[in-house]
Image: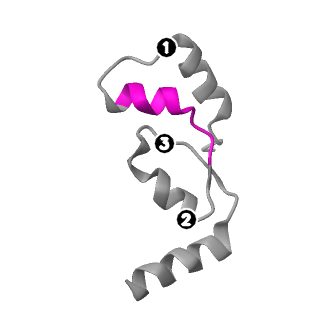
Amino acid sequence: MRPWLAALASFKARYAGTPVATTEPVADYMLQAMGMDNLTPFGFQADIMNGVDPSPEDIALEKASSPSTG
Protein backbone atom coordinates (compact mmCIF):
# COMPACT_ATOMS: atom_id res chain seq x y z
CA MET A 1 0.00 0.00 0.00
CA ARG A 2 2.90 2.38 0.64
CA PRO A 3 3.71 2.97 -3.04
CA TRP A 4 0.02 3.53 -3.83
CA LEU A 5 -0.45 5.95 -0.90
CA ALA A 6 2.76 7.77 -1.86
CA ALA A 7 1.52 8.13 -5.44
CA LEU A 8 -1.80 9.56 -4.18
CA ALA A 9 0.02 12.01 -1.91
CA SER A 10 2.34 13.10 -4.70
CA PHE A 11 -0.55 13.67 -7.08
CA LYS A 12 -2.49 15.60 -4.43
CA ALA A 13 0.51 17.80 -3.63
CA ARG A 14 0.80 18.80 -7.26
CA TYR A 15 -2.82 18.91 -8.46
CA ALA A 16 -5.08 19.44 -5.42
CA GLY A 17 -8.20 21.39 -6.31
CA THR A 18 -8.03 20.55 -10.01
CA PRO A 19 -11.59 20.42 -11.36
CA VAL A 20 -12.58 17.10 -12.90
CA ALA A 21 -15.68 15.64 -14.52
CA THR A 22 -16.68 12.00 -14.25
CA THR A 23 -19.35 9.81 -15.75
CA GLU A 24 -19.67 7.29 -12.93
CA PRO A 25 -19.00 7.50 -9.17
CA VAL A 26 -16.62 4.51 -9.19
CA ALA A 27 -13.56 6.77 -8.74
CA ASP A 28 -15.10 9.33 -6.36
CA TYR A 29 -13.23 8.13 -3.24
CA MET A 30 -9.90 8.09 -5.05
CA LEU A 31 -10.55 11.54 -6.53
CA GLN A 32 -11.35 12.84 -3.04
CA ALA A 33 -8.15 11.27 -1.66
CA MET A 34 -6.19 13.06 -4.38
CA GLY A 35 -7.83 16.39 -3.54
CA MET A 36 -9.66 16.73 -6.85
CA ASP A 37 -12.76 18.90 -7.19
CA ASN A 38 -15.34 16.66 -8.88
CA LEU A 39 -17.85 19.03 -10.45
CA THR A 40 -20.17 16.33 -11.83
CA PRO A 41 -23.60 16.19 -10.17
CA PHE A 42 -24.15 12.83 -8.45
CA GLY A 43 -27.51 12.42 -10.21
CA PHE A 44 -25.69 12.47 -13.56
CA GLN A 45 -23.18 9.87 -12.37
CA ALA A 46 -25.90 7.64 -10.92
CA ASP A 47 -27.94 7.72 -14.12
CA ILE A 48 -24.94 6.76 -16.26
CA MET A 49 -23.96 4.04 -13.78
CA ASN A 50 -27.48 2.59 -13.87
CA GLY A 51 -27.81 2.72 -17.65
CA VAL A 52 -30.41 5.48 -17.55
CA ASP A 53 -30.38 8.58 -19.70
CA PRO A 54 -29.56 11.58 -17.49
CA SER A 55 -32.24 14.21 -17.14
CA PRO A 56 -31.94 17.35 -19.27
CA GLU A 57 -31.30 19.30 -16.06
CA ASP A 58 -28.39 17.05 -15.05
CA ILE A 59 -26.94 17.20 -18.57
CA ALA A 60 -27.06 21.00 -18.42
CA LEU A 61 -25.39 20.99 -14.99
CA GLU A 62 -22.69 18.63 -16.23
CA LYS A 63 -21.97 20.78 -19.25
CA ALA A 64 -21.92 23.96 -17.16
CA SER A 65 -19.63 22.52 -14.50
CA SER A 66 -17.24 20.46 -16.63
CA PRO A 67 -13.73 21.82 -16.87
CA SER A 68 -12.66 23.10 -20.25
CA THR A 69 -10.74 20.59 -22.31
CA GLY A 70 -9.26 23.06 -24.58
In the picture, the disc for residue 23 is: none
Region in magenta? 38-48
Task: Count residues near mark 2 (Cα–Cα under 10 Å), then give few for <14, some for 14-19, many for 20+.
Answer: some
Disc 1 on helix, strand or loop?
A: loop
| 5 relative position to 69: left or right | left
Residue 10, horizontal then vertical, whole percent = 58, 80
Looking at the image, which residue is at 61% across and 57% down? 36
* Residue 31 among magenta residues: no
**Residue 57 at x, y = what percent?**
58, 14
Q: CA distance from mark 2 to mark 3?
A: 15 Å
- The residue carrying mark 1 is 55
Mark closer to the observer (2, 1): 2
Name which quarter of the figure residue 67 lies in: top right
- Residue 69 at x, y percent in the picture: 60, 44
Residue 11 left/right relative to 53: right
Q: Which mark is residue 22?
A: 3
Q: Residue at x 54, y 20 (%)?
A: 59
Q: Nearer the viewer, residue 14 or 45?
A: 45
The residue most toward the right is: 17
Q: Earlier in the sequence, mark 2 or mark 3?
A: 3
Q: Earlier in the sequence, mark 2 or mark 1?
A: 2
Identity, as a three-letter code, of the amino acid under mark 3: Thr
Q: Residue furthest top?
A: 56
Name of the residue lying farthest toward the bottom: 2
Q: For the residue marked with disc 1, what is the amino acid?
A: Ser
Q: Which residue is mark 2?
A: 33
Q: Quadrant of the C terminus?
A: top right
* 34 sits left or right of 19 in the view: left
Secondary structure at badge 3 equals: loop
User: What type is the residue that disc 2 sits on?
Assistant: Ala
Most frequent secondary structure within the magenta stretch: helix
